Image (cartoon, grey):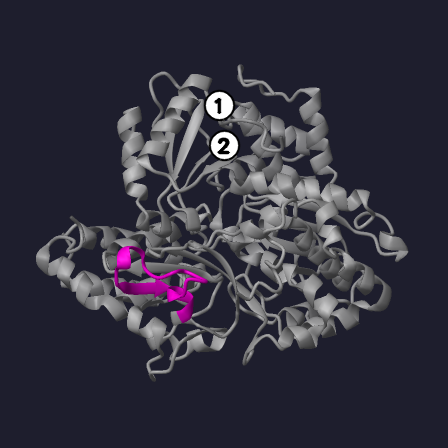
Amino acid sequence: MAKQILLNNIDVLGLASFEIYRKLGGYAAVEKTLKNYTPDQVTEEVKKSGLKGRGGAGFPAGMKWSFLDKSTNNPRYFVCNFDESEPGTFKDRHIGQLNPHQLIEGMILGSYTLGARNSYIYIRGELFYVLRILEKAIDEAYRNGFLGENILGSGYSLDLSCHPGGGAYICGEETALIESLEGKRGNPRIKPPFPAIVGLYGCPTVVNNVETISNLPWIMNNGADAYSAIGIGNSKGTKLISACGHINKPGIYEIELGLPVEEFIYSEEYCGGIRNGNQLKAVVAGGSSVPILPAELILKTAKGEPRLMSYESLAEGGFETGTMLGSGGFIVMDETTCMVKNLLTFVRFYHHESCGQCSPCREGTGWMEKILQRIENGQGSMKDIDLLADIAKHIEGNTICPLGDAAAWPVASAIRHFRAEFEDHVKLQRCPLSK
Amino acid sequence: MQNNNNITEFNTETLVLVNRIISRYPQGRQKSAILPVLHIAQAEHKGWLSAEMMDYVASLLGIQSIEVYEVASFYSMFNLQPVGNCVIEVCQTGPCWLNGSEEILAHFEKRLGIKPGETTADGQFSLKTVECLAACGNAPVIQVGTEYHEKMTTQKADELLEKWQVENKCSHTNPYQ
C-alpha cells in the first residue's frame, strides 16, 4: 500500500500530539526550509514537484502560488480550505483528526512562502470536534516555538487560527470561503479578480485544500524530484481516496496515482470488492459532482484500456465516456442501486446548497429535484427525461461559481449512461428497483 | 455554561473566549468572528438564535444587527426558531442513502412520533435532516451537537435514545469546550 507520504504514520498512537509527531521527524521541514530556502525557492520546489490541488479542481499548486500579487505592501493571507463537504469525500477529516501537526507544518511552510503573517484554517462547522483537536495542536506548536514571533530565530513570524463555518457546502468554493471568513454570507465572487490579487480583506490570498497543504512537509524534506518520481504522467505523487458505498472495506486509502481502478475496487488491500458478492453497477469517482460512470467504463476506457486512478486516465474520453479524479470521493454502487433515486439525493443536495445568487442554479436545481422526485415516484413522462437534460445543459457554464456545473454534471451523466433505467421508471410508473 | 434560561448575555468566562476569538482577526475586521460567536451564542441560548441574541452578538462585534441576521439566515447550522433540548440530525445524501439512512430516519420518526423539522411535545427531542456530513465511509451518519454517531443501525438508535433520555441529553453545549 502506498502509504508513503500522507498516511505513513497514521496508525501511530498519539500522533496528534506534538511530542510524538516531532519524535517521528515532524517539523524538520520547517527547520530546513526557514534556514535554507527563500520563499521563491520553495515555490519553485513545489512547482517542480508537480503537486496539484487536491480539493477537486486539480490546479497545479505551485503555479497558483506564483500568481500571488507581490507588488503591493498589503498583507498577504494563506488560508486552508477544510470545508470538506462534497458528498463521498471524507479524507481531510482523517488528517485533521489523526495528524493535525502535519497540516500545521504545511501551513507554516505555505505561509512562509507566500509571506503571510496571519493564516487561517477554515473548517466546516459540523466538525467542531476536529477543530478542538486542531486548536490543541496549534497551541502546542506555539509553545514549542513553531508559531508566533520569530519562529526558530528566523525572523519570520506567523499567527495561525481555526475558523468554523456554518454548514454551507458553497463555502468550499474559494471566493465564497473568503466572504464567509470575512463574516458574510457565502456568496461566491465574480472572478477575475482572483484571490491571488484581491482575496481576504481585499488582499492577495491563496486558498489551498488540507491534503494539498499536508503534502508540503514531505516535499520539502525529500525534494521535488522524489515527489515527482511517484505517480504516472502528469499525475504526480499520491492521492487520498475516500471510498464508500457498496464495498466491503470503506475507508481512506493513500494510493500512488496510476493504480488501476479495478485493483482499487477489488483488491483486499483497498476496497475489497463489492458487498455480498454483488455486481458492480456504477461509480462516482471523485465526489458527487463528477460524472457517474457505469461499471464497464470505470474499469476500462472506451478504447478498452484499463482505467487508472489518475487525473488523465479518469478524464480519458471526456465527459462522453470519462469522468474526473476530483476530490477523490469514490462512491461505489452495486446492482441493487436505483440510478434515479441516487441522482435525486445528489440533486436535492445541490438544491439545498445553492447560495441563490444565480437564477440558473437557484431555480434549476429545485426544478430538477421536483422532476426527479416525480420520475422516481412513477409519475414522470418521457418528456421529463429530456427536460432534465435540457435544464442541466442550461445551468452548466451559466453561473458565477462551479456549483452550477457540479449540479449539472451528475444529471447529464446519469441520463447519458442510464437512460433506459429512467425510461423504465416512466413505463412501469414505479421504481423498478424498489421492493 | 448555562442552558436553563434564555440568557441574552454571555458570562465573563464566555466573554473571555469571545474576545480571544475576535483577536484572531486583524484590527477593524472583528466582523470575521461572526460565525464562531454565533455558534457560541446558539449553544448558550437553548440551541437557537432569537432576534435579541443576534442583536447582542451585533453589539459585541460593533456591527449592525442586519449584518448578523443575514448571516444567521444563510447558514444551515443556525436555528432561527426554538428547538428541542437534543437535536438529532440525520444525513440523507447519496452515500448515507446507499447505506440505509432512510431506515434510520424512519426509525427516529417512529420512536419519537415526529417528522423532520418537528420537536417532541415534552421539548426533549427535535429531528432534522441534513446534507452530507463528510463521514461517508461510516454511513449512515447522524450528528447530535458536536458529536457524530457513525455506522448507525436501528438498534444503535434505540440504545442512544435510551441513553439520552436517561441523561436528559442536551446537544447545545459550547462547541469550543
The residue nearer to you, when weighing A7 against A210, is A7
Q: What residue is pinned by disc 1?
A: B170
Q: What residue is pinned by disc 2?
A: B145
Residue type at tag 1:
Cys
Please say if A247 is above or below B153.
Answer: below
Please say if A223 is above or below A213.
Answer: below
Q: Which residues are magenta?
A: A263-284
Outermost residue, left direction? A428
Q: Residue at x 39, y 19 (%)?
A: B123
Q: Is residue B115 visible?
A: no
Q: Is the residue at mark 2 from the same chain as the one at mark 1?
A: yes
Q: Residue at x 61, y 62 (%)?
A: A212
**Percent position of residue A342, x then y:** 29, 55
| Left or right: A254 in relation to A427 | right
| Tag 1 subunit | B
| Left or right: B24 in relation to A421 | right
| Tag 2 subunit | B
Mark 1, Cα crowd under 10 Å, few <14 / some 14-19 / many 20+, is many
Please say if A419 is above or below B154.
Answer: below
| Left or right: B92 in relation to A15 | left
Element on which disc 1 rests: loop
